[in-house]
Image: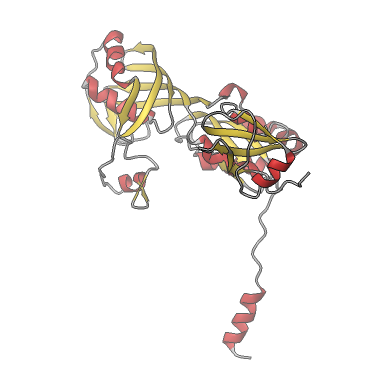
Amino acid sequence: MSSNCSRGMRKMGRRRPQPSGDAIAGMLLLDKPAGITSNGALQEAKRLLNARKGGHTGSLDPIATGLLPLCFGSATKLSGFFLDADKKYWAKIRLGEATDTGDAEGTVLTSRPVGLTAAEVDMALDRFRGPILQTPPMYSAIKVNGQPLYKLAREGKEIERQPRAVTVYELELTAFEGRDLELNIDCSSGFYVRGLAHDLGERLGVGGHVVALRRIGVGTLKVSEAVTLQALLQMSDVAQRRAVLIPPDRSLGHLPTVDLSVEAAFYLCRGQPVRANGLPESGLVRLYARDVGFLGIGNVTDDMQVAPRRLIVDTVKSA
C-alpha cells in the first residue's frame, strides 16, 4: 500500500473530538472580579457548570468588576440582543494623569496638577449628558478592516475613528476629593467610560483615566442578582451551581410580551410572519405559545404581523 493511500485512510478514520460538558440551557448573572478577562470568566463558569456551549453578552475590561450576563445552550442565540441594552456603571476617575489605554493598566502619558472644585468638575460633566457624539478609544474591540483597534494600538498605530451617537441618561457626580471623582452613569449601548475619562480630562485641561469601574446594570438586570465565581466554587456540586441559572426570557423584561396560538407558533417556527393580538406598533417583542412557553424574539412588521427575529425553539407541533 502506498504511503499516500495510508495517509488518506488514516485521515478518513479520524473523528472530530466531541465537545465536553452537558447541553444545559439558561443564563448566569455573574459578578465578574477584577483582573480577569470576560472570556476568562466565561471559561471558568463553563468549567464549574460543566456546560458544553456558552457565550458572554458584551465584554468588561479586565480592570472592571460587576454584572456580566453569560448565556448557555440555546440561550446563546439571544446573546447579541444584550449588546444593545442600556448599561449602568459606577466609575472612579483620576484627574491629572492621562494614560494610553484610558485606564490604570496603561502607561502614563501626561501628568498635570489638579486644582479644581467639585462645581467646576460637575459643570464640565454637562457636556457629556444627554445625546452626544463620542469617539471610541483606540483600546477598544471595534474593528477597522477586520482588525480590532486594540491590536493596532498595541502596535503603536493611531487610526482615525468616527464619532458615534450615544446617550447618557444620567451622569451623577457622587464624590470628588483631591484628584479622584466618582460617578454613577446610566448610558446607552456603545458608550465607553474610558472615553469619558479621557474626554473629561481634556476638557478640564488636566487629563484623566479610569482607576475603578463596576457595571451595576444591563437592561433590567442588576448586579445585586449576580453570583461570584468564588460563590460558585464553594457550592457543593454541579446541580447546586446550575440551580442559580435563570431562564433567558427573564432578562428581556424590557420587551413587550406577545402570546401566540399553537398554530401561529407552528408557522412562525417555519419562518413565516403571523398575526397576533396585542401587538405594539413596531419593534421587538417576546414571543410565547401555550404549552410551549418562551419561543424567542420577534419583530413587528409594517403590516402588523410578527416575524421571527431570533427563536430558541426550532419546531412546534401543529394543533
Position of 159 compared to 275: left or right? left
Look at the image and name its color scheme: secondary structure
Residue 123 sits in which quadrant?
Answer: top left
Q: Is residue 220 above or below residue 17?
A: above
**Depth order, front residue of 299/182:** 299
At a point 58% along the width and 42% down the height, the residue shown is 307
Residue 262 sits in which quadrant?
Answer: top right
Query: In x, y percent, where is residue 179?
Result: 31, 17
Can you say which quadrant of the picture contains the N terminus? bottom right
Query: In x, y percent, where is residue 129?
Result: 34, 19
Residue 21 appears in the rendering: yes
- Number of callouts in the render? 0
Query: In x, y percent, where is residue 315?
Result: 70, 48
Position of 185 compared to 44: left or right? left
Which residue of the protein is positioned furthest toward the front in this rendering? 303
Can you say which quadrant of the picture contains the C terminus? top right
Q: Is residue 1 above or below residue 201?
A: below
Query: In x, y percent, where is residue 7?
Result: 59, 81
Residue 198 sits in which quadrant?
Answer: top left
**Depth order, front residue of 41/256:** 256
At a point 36% along the width and 44% down the height, the residue shown is 150
At a point 23% along the width and 30% down the height, the residue shown is 110
Residue 229 appears in the rendering: no
**Depth order, front residue of 49/105:** 49
